[in-house]
Image (cartoon, grey):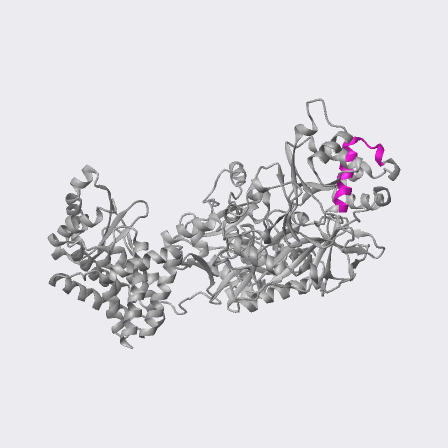
Amino acid sequence: MKVHIHPTAIFRTPKFSYQSDISACWDELKEAIAISSEAFYETIKDVKADEIQNLPPKIFFTVWKYFNRAKFRSTPYGTFASFSILKDSVKFNADKIVIEEHQLEHSFIDWPQKNNIEFPIGELLSKNCMLFSNSSYYPTSNSLRYIACTDGLFELAEIDQDIFVQKILEACLKPISVENLIRIIGIADDEHESFFSFLGDMHDLQLLFTDHDPNILGEDYFKRIGFPDTDLPKYIIAERKAKSGQIDERLLQNVPNLISLLQQIIPYNEKEAIKKFTDRFKKKFEQKEVSLLIALDPEMGVGYDELEQAGQSDDFVTQFSHNKKDQTKDKEAVKTALSKALNQESFEKDKTIYLNKLALSLNEKPTKLPNTFSMLMSVSDEMLCVDQIGGITANGLSGRFTMANTEVENQSKIIAQIEQQANPDILFFDVAYMVEATVDNINRRKIIYGHQLSILNYDTSEDPLSLNDIMISVQGSEIILRSKKLNKRMVPKMASAYNYTRSDLSIFRLLCDLQHQDIATNLTISLESLFPNLDYYPPLQFHNISLSRAKWKVKKESIFPSKNEKLSVKQCRVFLADLGVSKCFKTGASDQTLCFHLDNDDDLNAFIQYMQKQKSVYLEEVILPENSTVVDENGKPYLAQFILNLYQEAQIYSPANFVGTPELTEVKQYFPPGSEWLYFEIYCHQQRSDEMLAGVINYFLDTHHDDIKSWFFIRYNENGNHLRLRILLKDVAKGQELTAALSNYLDEDLKVGLVSDLQIRTYKRETQRYGNALIEQVETHFGADSNYVLSLLQSRPEAFAKYKLCSDVANKIQDSGIFDSKDFAKIIKMFSDSFNEEHKLDATDFKKLNAQYQLYRKADSFELSPDQLEKFELFAQSFLKVLRQANSGKVVSLFSDLMHMHVNRLFNKDQRTHEMVMYYYLFKDVQRRNAMAS
């Protein structure tokens, strides 16, 4: 998995050189302020450069902050910073990068202005507008549910089920003209007026959108509808043209090795919301593939991250209840990996910690890297200063600039192509989402990926994806999305830097969280996050790459010793110098930072003012270059921040194994109490379950043998350890009698607490796992398995004996010819390796297993009684019969499933660990058997 640096880079520069003087820049600064804050501009518009120092302290401080931003911060904001694109950006012995001082202003109507646009729906319909469905609709037993948004809050809306409404929605899943819709639906000429009224109602309910409704992706909405932009507030993306120059290749030579190291020391940290969803989904739907919309329904599904609002709720309360933030601590796992080599006692002032010199414990199986991701960094002479490494796609940081520059748009499509070529069978798609008008400018972007999914907005792409086309399943521990229409696995790729955790829409949050599934999307590390609340952090480097700069903690009381006392500028300078603070430092949160020079009185005055509203802050070293990499045509240096695009071309997503044709066999899926299947859950201690089976349950089965057609049991620990007893009745009318009988037999155990609960449940067949055609045969096999295990429990065999009996049935399967002998060994090894990995076995564990295997081999074989032998043969023949009836593509997984259920029945606790040991021994048995046969 070799990491490459893409030759095209995007970089961002502040408005002014960091060496600029405010007097020389005053008029330009006022122009930038006028765009960003009209109210404050009115306060200072008539102030002249030589009057700045005479401004009131609060106003001067605000001016200082604006100017500070314009020199030191490259985050896009009006004209306070610009982006540039540089092709062939890396070269050996590179020249300085020269940019134009002049900023190109790409001007768009500010996104909140969309709320002031209204088009009479009747007029649009009469002019043959295009219509597009809200594809989040799905039917319940008697209604149609869909997602709607009111005042920035999402809700699950509901209308009575209406075939005519569904017919219209289905016809509009791809934008369609009103005239074509009339033709397809078959509306008579004299019904047009009432039909238009009906469509208007659907539009009001947010079931339909017109081509005059906003689109956040693709051609700019305001330009698309021809909306005049005179005198409206503007959203500005500033650009500077890069004229020449490159980054010196030697500076970047350690980047691939850094990425490789970070990949090996940063463990994968699964998002808690994904983990909980996966667990709940598997409990409710098991291995079934269901509609994504159904899965997220709060009643019919499992929801996501407690975000759902089923029906009407108190809007006032709701707006606050969704302010919760994701509490997942991404860095906790990193600390565990690094803490052996790093400890805070070793932190010394003025002494850099070199990551490349530490004895680090590396992951044997590191998490996969995304195919493309970014390194956000600056260059300071011979050093790279990293701000951030990671992302689910390199397009995340550059997507917003596609609106302003076709070169960036083309570059973003190249990035998307790298991802697609590495995973040719995957359908990557962008997500068009908008709800926060004040921040949605960041979401405006061109269409980069081949497909897009629009949530509650109009879609301008060639073939829109539909929410109700997306199916979801859990395969192993991995969540898989699939398009029914295209029969392809789907993976979301949102080409936006929008903080999606702000959203309270469950389907959007799930899609965004899924972007991070099983890949390393955050490779950024800092000592502060690993060892919080220290007074000092030394610099952390990897060769010439600075991963985090030195930091010093400063408390408010150090600057304001008492309520009416504060340090003078001179005293503040002495205090900071004694603390060891660097000549240039910054403080603030995320990219909202301010830079200060220790030798500048205005800066220290501003710092003292800043500290008035803080309790404590960290001051971070700023490494100013002596020889800047980026200069304008006049030679003025800039503090540029580079978005270095990194990529690797290995396949990271496998196409999911889907059955392409629907089940032809129809079978009943659910059996509620009172039907032919009785289903009991008997809650008892796991170590009592064998006694329960061999005693009360065996007696119950014998006593009512004539009424029972088939039966089987499973051990489970969900909501407490219990036995699941399922009985197929010969006569449904006998159900009440058998229920009363079992209750009576368990009465004493219930009274004394040996059985904590007895429940009667609905039996839901596992047709997704076994298929409609096989499910009845599998149930019959489970009966043979249960009868065999029940006969064994009377003899209480040891674990070694149970492993040998598993090996015996495996031998019969191998001898049957269903699997080739060599293939069978590979299959067993595959299962064994999977269980070994699940149990995180190390060299010591394998040594113990091998020692136990020798004892296992020498142990006496378990002698089966004639009755047990008969039941073993019936079980083995049943096993073979089911395997022979299965499709060839399902035989391996079916073998695994049936063996898994057999081990579940054999052992009353630690079943997965016993299964791991069983497969480990079985693989060695199969190897020996094959060797002796050859």
Relative horizontal placement of residue 352, taking residue 339 as reference (left or right):
right
Foreground residue among 700 and 456: 700
Q: Nearest the camera: 14 or 644?
A: 644
Q: Is residue 632 in the magenta section?
A: no
- Residue bounds of the magenta highlight: 52-71
Q: In terms of depth relative to the viewer, which is nearer, 408 or 223?
A: 408
Q: Is residue 857 left or right of residue 86?
A: left
Q: Is residue 68 highlighted in magenta? A: yes
Q: Taking 885 as reference, is 273 above or below it?
A: above
Q: Is residue 691 left or right of residue 249?
A: left
Would you say 862 lies left or right of 835 here? left
Quadrant location of the N terminus in the rendered image: bottom right
Could you say where residue 389 lies in the image, as x and y percent from the top left? 61, 54
Residue 779 in sight in this render: no
Q: Position of residue 567 (x, y in %)?
A: 74, 27
Q: How many marks?
A: 0
Give the quadrant of the C terminus.
bottom left
The reply to whether residue 536 is in sight is: yes
Q: Quadrant of residue 759?
A: top left
